[in-house]
Amino acid sequence: MTHALPGYLCAEDGTRADARTAPWCCPVCAGPWDLDFTPDPAAVLDPAAGPNSLWRYDSALPLTGALSVTLAEGNTPLVQLAERVHAKLDFLMPTLSFKDRGAVMLAELARRLGPRRVVADSSGNAGTALAAYCARAGLRCEVFVPEGTSEKKMEQMRAHGATVRVVPGGREAAAVAAREAAGLPGVFYASHVFNPYFLHGTKTYVYEVWEALGGHLPEVLVVPVGNGTLLLGAALAVEELARRGVRPPALIGVQSAAVAPLASAFRSGAENAEPVPQLPTLAEGIAIPVPPRARQILAAVRKSGGTFLTVTDDQVRAAQLDLARRGLFVEPTAAACWAAVGPTAAEDPLRGRSAVLPLCGAGAKTGLAAPAV
């Protein structure tokens, strides 16, 4: 039995498309798709009664029916870092990053569509997650990565059976190469940026925080932002839970000071972000010079009453060490939020408010950041 798939909707020009036959981007403006889907706020939401995976939130998810793809992802714990500040340990996911939340949705979607192969572009974690979940779903997977991608992450992709294509240049060059392949017959482009099903996977992060805090959310959610998949997923969940009477938090986005198009746009009051140079940074996972969903990200942060913060490599390095000495070994990108609001921060942006931040990638994938020269 084939269950109905919510269709795509372009937020820029209103174009609609069937998810089974649509191109990977809006054919009118070439922008990313949103999903024509709103969960029923009256539907029963009882995650404790569901399976031990993110499918426990099935009444809030766009895919229903026979959900065969899972690695028991989700349901990661909260640990206290400071008074009123908790970290959610998403580096304990099956592939050691939060990207599993969106990858399982894309793999389940691809399984239903039945392509000959799945292609993706990634700086590391999204690629490892998609490789694993495609392996679980029995799908051929090909991942385009920029040169300089962590050898450990590429090794993980290959171990899951994916073909890895190393593209000369930075993150945007890998994306361009993947999009060229995406136009070929029989290819499903599992883009964690352009495909909105990914965002409906990452939103489960906030649903889990809501569950762990007894039906409440903290006053602030601090989120690392590159392409914005976790922040936009969080914004979706906040909006959906608000319809159930849950008080929404402010969203604080964190970027690397070296590559901060969204923070710059936010400070200038712009509705969209201008491209910035692709400079080296320890926080490579959020070093996105041209975020395709920039307009949506900026609008979501402003609507929440939040802000953007930037962190230097020295702050990231110090935060990674600080977390390790608290027993939590994460990759540098995952330390960015703690760098922004923890003891190494230049100021106290939380001002005593309760907050949750993600530790979204394991240090085993990258090792400790090298000391500054």
Image (cartoon, rainbow, N blue to C red):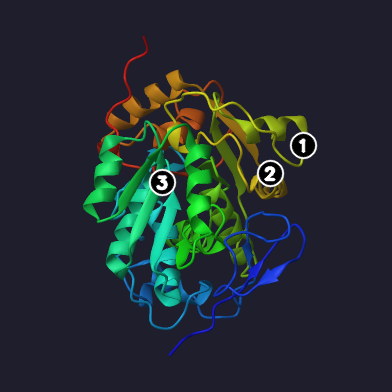
Amino acid tagged 1? Ala
Q: Are marks 3 and 1 in contact (CB under 8 Å)?
A: no
Of the numbered discs 1 and 2, the one sitting upstream in the chain is: 1
Amino acid tagged 3? Phe
Which of the 4 quarters of the picture holds residue 234? bottom right
x and y percent of residue 165 in the render?
Answer: 36, 44
Please determine whether, in this image, residue 117 is positioned above or below residue 158: below
Of the numbered discs 3 and 1, the one sitting upstream in the chain is: 3
Q: Nearer the viewer, mark 3 or mark 1?
A: 3
Q: Is residue 11 left or right of residue 252?
A: right
* 254 or 69, nearer to the observer: 69
x and y percent of residue 345 in the render?
Answer: 50, 24
- The extreme top residue here reads 373
Which of the 4 quarters of the picture holds residue 52? bottom left
Please determine whether, in this image, residue 327 is positioned above or below residue 345: below
Amino acid tagged 2? Leu
Q: Residues within 10 Å of mark 2 (few under 14, many from 20)?
A: many
Q: Are marks 1 and 2 in contact (CB under 8 Å)?
A: yes
Residue 328 seen in the current view:
no
Q: Nearer the viewer, mark 3 or mark 2?
A: 3
Q: Which residue is mark 2?
A: 298
* 81 or 150, nearer to the observer: 150
Disc 2 on helix, strand or loop? helix
Residue ID at (28%, 31%): 324
Q: Residues within 10 Å of mark 1 (few under 14, many from 20)?
A: some
* 173 or 323, nearer to the observer: 173
How far is mark 1 from mark 2, CA to CA? 9 Å
x and y percent of residue 103 in the render?
Answer: 41, 59
Q: Which residue is mark 1?
A: 270
- The extreme bottom residue here reads 1
Q: Residue 144 got which mark?
A: 3
